[in-house]
Amino acid sequence: MIRDKNLKGKVAVITGGGTGLGLEIAKSFVQQSMKVVICSRSQEHLDAGAQELRNFSEDLLALPCDVREPGQIRTLKTNVLNEYGRIDILVNNAAGNFIYPAEKLPLKGWKSVIDIVLNGSFYCAQIFGEQMIAQKEGQIINILATYAWTGGPGTIHSASAKAGVLAMTRTLAVEWARYGVRVNAVAPGPFDTEGARVRLWPTEEMKQRLIEDIPLGRFADPKEVANAVLFLVSSNARYINGECLTIDGGAWLGKGIGRAFEILDQVVALREAGKKERTNKE
Ligand code: NAP
């Protein structure tokens, strides 16, 4: 893991920080002696997450907040400022997702995912961004998915929302650079968390089918994705702005025409066989 002494004491808010990737990011931050605030809707998630984080540091907050509700985000901001006096980093990680064919997707489901991922990310960016602009310093990391640009059959709600957050990342990176606020994104391919397992690949067979499409032949470890976030907020990345760091084992590049590599061996074998035949004839 990167060690960056400049991160010591920085205040980071992580939405959906009590579970899965959000909790891994929180762990990597507390190990840099940062002051971490995890937030989400369920007290149960927050308590369990905070308990794990306390193995590394007591200097953290676990506060309820539904990112669909700007009023709750403002209350969270007030509480963080009362406790720590500043906000250096926001990680927009909270999300909802489930598999559904587009033609049958209930509009309630579409709205719910758009509200959490697209609207929630913007509300948090604007509300916490206001403080970063006042400080003339801050960073926002948006957690995307590679289907933000490949499209996501079966998850049109999430893919559309993440595509919007990618556009948001690039737009804010330009608008807020003059205030000293950098905005970047991380786009993972699939990785194993309880939330994803239950909703996206409920059987081992389905998981293996997804792994077949990954050139590196495995899912990411959530720690590897957290490391990418840590790199972007570290001083090693201070000239990186408006970038999206893909961490998917090469999976999205292997799709479409890229799958031609699967017939590579056969094409080479046929060519070699043809060459041999021609040589034998000569
Ligand atoms: P997860 O464990 O299900 O985490 C989602 C988190 O979001 C939960 O902690 C949940 O907590 C919180 N949340 C949901 N709705 C919320 C709301 N309205 N307000 C505040 N918090 C809310 O999922 P994960 O697998 O770690 O995914 C984390 C991120 O990575 C997401 O952005 C996801 O899209 C992205 N991603 C995941 C994968 C994957 O394969 N796992 C792949 C690509 C990208 P509460 O229920 O307590 O609110």
Image: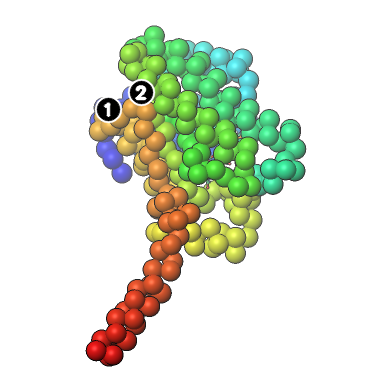
Q: What is the crowding at mark 1: few (fewer than 14 residues within 10 Å), some, or many (at least 20)?
A: few
Q: What is the CA distance from the residue labelled 1 to the residue labelled 2?
A: 8 Å
- Image-quadrant location for residue 102: top right
Q: Residue at x 37, y 28 (%)?
A: 242
Residue 247, visible in the rendered structure: yes
Where does residue 158 sit, x and y in percent of width and height?
59, 38
Q: Dots 1 and 2: beta carbons under 8 Å?
A: yes
Between 79 and 255, the one lying in front of the other is 255
* In the depicted structure, whether residue 14 falls above or below residue 100: above
Q: Residue at x 44, y 40 (%)?
A: 187
- List the single residue furthest toward the top: 134
Which quadrant: the C terminus?
Answer: bottom left
Residue 16, visible in the rendered structure: no
Q: Quadrant of ligand 1?
A: top right
Where does residue 94 sit, x and y in percent of width and height?
55, 33
Which disc number belongs to residue 62? Answer: none
Q: Circle 2 is placed at which residue position? A: 182
Q: Amino acid at mark 2?
A: Arg
Q: What is the crowding at mark 2: few (fewer than 14 residues within 10 Å), some, or many (at least 20)?
A: many
Query: Left of 66 or right of it: where is 282?
Result: left
Instruction: Determine whether the beta carbon of the residue marked 2 sits less than 8 angstroms from the nearest atom of ligand 1.
Output: no
* In the depicted structure, whether residue 136 falls above or below residue 47: above
Where does residue 267 sit, x and y in percent of width and height?
39, 72
* In the depicted structure, whether residue 82 falls above or below residue 227: above
Query: Left of 119 or right of it: where is 229?
Result: left
Q: Circle 1 is placed at which residue position? A: 238
Between 217 and 42, the one lying in front of the other is 217
Instruction: Determine whether the beta carbon of the residue marked 1 sits less than 8 angstroms from the nearest atom of ligand 1.
Output: no
Where does residue 49 sit, x and y in percent of width and height?
52, 38
Q: Residue at x 45, y 47 (%)?
A: 222
Q: Amino acid at mark 1?
A: Arg
